[in-house]
Amino acid sequence: MEFSYRRVEVAPAVSLNVAVCGEGRPVVLLHGFPQTHLMWRHVAPALAAAGHLVICPDLRGYGDSDKPEGTAAYAKRVMAQDVVALAGALGHERFALAGHDRGALVAIRAGLDHPSRITHLALLDVLPTLDSWEVLRGTAGIVGFHLYLMAAPAPLPERLIAGAPDAFFGHFLDLWGNGSLPAAIRQRYLEASRDAVPSIVADYRATATVDVEHDEADRAAGRRLRMPVTVLQQDWGAAMGFDAKARWGAWAEDLSHHTVNAGHFMAEEEPEPVVRHLLELLSREPASPVS
């Protein structure tokens, strides 16, 4: 099953490149860094074959979607609104949502800000923003060096990364890919990232600024994800000394947490268990659509 493509305006002067396949109950899949919608190329057809309309956008700032300027444009609250607007433009008031890495942060914000719109939520290999910053301590936190680099004031990180974009983005593709990325896909990710350095940096800079403020406000108010939530992640807790399930439990009322053996790019490395967990999530009773 192949994708069909369209451009959908989700905000003034911001349109997303969107790949769609299948028919049935809608599921939106959000990619991570440094990727595009192509990371779902194995998962999306399997979900479509199981009776779902699968919607895979390039996030704003990535791939072939528009790339507005400025950190504020990449607040996860803004990017979550893109997702809600996208689903609405395609005729879907309520939909399931899955995100990987950066896309998972957008998905979390969508679940918190728009609980009446999200029926089910799946989050792949990430922690909520506040928790990520809290667990990145000492030498174990070196794994997240790029978070600190791209949080630095403009234009230093933009200039450094633009000086050797293939080396920078290729580092993560090779380290996290565990040999699962075909050369042609790796090249497409490099090309897309090379052309999006300012917007990718702005996305990460937002996660060190405005996104923290929004998450702190939600934590203080006791807001939680009310829909069924499935989390799939590597065993980062054992490596860095934290209880991942407990941290997720503080945010999600109806949580199914799974530690997986695949690497960070699990949807590409081992798509079959990812599909299985997503279908199990979609079989659970959704939360009431009360805002």
Image: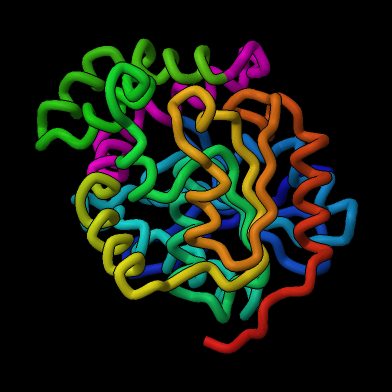
- The answer to whether 83 appears left or right of 19 in the picture is left
Magenta stretch: give its range. Answer: 177-205
Overall secondary structure of the magenta section: helix
| Residue 42 against residue 185 in the figure, above or below | below
Q: Quadrant of residue 161?
A: top left
Instruction: Look at the image and tell me in which quarter the N terminus lies.
Output: top right
Q: How many marks?
A: 0
- The answer to whether 213 appears left or right of 45 in the picture is left
Q: Quadrant of residue 167?
A: top left
- The answer to whether 166 appears left or right of 164 in the picture is right
Where is residue 124 drawn, in percent x and y?
59, 42
Where is residue 189 drawn, in percent x and y?
50, 26
The residue at 63%/85% (across/down) is 289
| Residue 187 against residue 204 in the figure, above or below | above
Q: How is the image coloured?
A: rainbow
The residue at 35%/26% (across/down) is 144
Look at the image and tell me whether residue 19 can be seen: no
Report the residue that reaches farthest toward the right.
50
Where is residue 101 drawn, in percent x and y?
50, 40
| Front-most of residues 104 and 247 | 247
| Front-most of residues 279 and 17 | 279
- The answer to whether 111 appears left or right of 263 in the picture is left
Where is residue 13 drawn, in percent x and y?
32, 63
The residue at 46%/44% (across/down) is 127
Q: Is residue 273 magenta?
A: no
The residue at 69%/32% (across/down) is 260
Look at the image and tell me whether residue 161 can be seen: yes
| Residue 281 against residue 128 in the figure, above or below | below
